[in-house]
Amino acid sequence: MRIGVDLRSLQTGSQYRGIGYFTYNLQKAVSEIDKENEYIFFANEFGPGERYPLLERLVSETGHRLVALPVTHARDREWGRTWERLSTPFFFRLERMDILHVTSLFEDATPVGFYPFGGKLAVTLYDLIPLIFRADYLDGAPEWKSEYMSLVDLVREHADGVLAISKCTRDDAVKLIGLPPGKISVVYGATGDTFSLIEDGARVAELNKRLGVKGDYILFAAAEDFRKNFENLLKAYAILRKEYGRTAQLVMVGKSSPDWRRRLTDLGVSFGLEGGDMVFTGFVTDEEMNLLYNGASVFAFPSLYEGFGLPVLEAMLCGVPVVVSSNSSLMEVAGDAALLVDPLDPRDMAEKMNMALADAALREDLRMRGFLNVKRFSWRKAAEETVNFYRSLSENA
């Protein structure tokens, strides 16, 4: 088979998020196990001075041919999109592919619309969160809503196969957009080589000192998004300190603006917290994140909804007891290796965090269960399932 992979998701902000992580690791793993089929990568041509490290690395490591799709630098955004709609399918057709795999639909650089290219169309679906939280993501942005819904319609009408990153995403696709279950294959992601147990406590201590972390701490990692449930976490943390007497700091990791940090600090103060109780690290490297995981007493991830929830596995790989929401894909990922909480109930969250902090036997049990749970997920397994997905698409008329 000749399989084309649309990698323009590695040229937008997605290259720094879970989409980029999943796309890079999956395609790298596929290239390592599949020597039978031919793979062709597609990306927009690079402008002067543009660099896309993850994309360039993937091309270099796999040795697959990269086809540069021409782009227009017209100031008129609509004209630019029209140009892409007209030109991109031409280059797809030239390659005479059996399958074209679009690794991410909802990218500003991805032209709206699928056009016949002579093969089967596969799409990776990470989540349908904008449909689940319409009021927050779509209703206040009519242009984005129209574009998003048109892409959803195109998946339903034109995709021959959909690769969902969790059973939760698969079920959402069936329920919310009417995709036939038989068109959807679930392929889980996994952790990378970046995260592991660290025996050298001095490195952890050195980083913590630099960040202002003192003693025990509860770790939380999230970007600026209401879905990450900051307010209820702060309420739970306040209960943990006031009613359970816990002194562990709350360390919040993630790129954030000064206004956002100020808002959260003020919110915490309104719940009775003091400034020193909370530490905002801002953006950290993967190496620093690994150290933070290793030094944490508990990893809290009370998200309102996740398409997969990779930080849960990263924390478990580093031996951290995990407290996580009992919703969406998070129960799939956590298995029996975490304490599950109602993300809308701060008191439940506080109780479970206290249990993880107070009970040494429970902590060790969660650590051991976490190590076993992580073994359920591997990029090799994901690659094998993806190749089978491609074969199934090719064989079905």
Image (tube, rainbow, N blue to C red):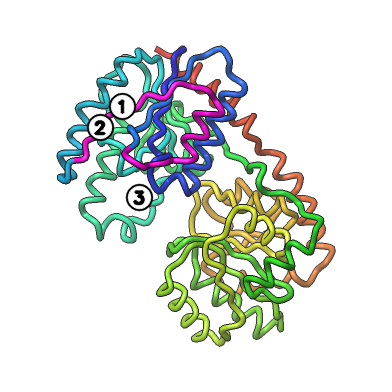
Please tell me whether mark 1 sits on a helix, a strand or a loop: helix
Residue at 31% x, 27% y is: 158
| Type of amino acid at the residue the image marks with label 1 | His
The range drawn in magenta is 47-73
Sequence-earlier tag: 3 or 2: 2
Horizontally, residue 257 falls left or right of residue 246, namely: left
Residue at 47% x, 48% y is: 16
| Type of amino acid at the residue the image marks with label 2 | Gly
Quote the CA–CA distance across marks 3 and 2. Answer: 19 Å
Please tell me whether mark 3 sits on a helix, a strand or a loop: helix
- Residue density around tag 2, few if under 14, some if 14–19, many if 20 or more, within 10 Å: some
Residue 298: % across, % down: 69, 65
Residue 40: % across, % down: 43, 21
Residue at 50% x, 80% y is: 265
Q: Which is closer to the viewer, label 3 or label 2?
A: 2
**Mark seen at residue 158:** 1
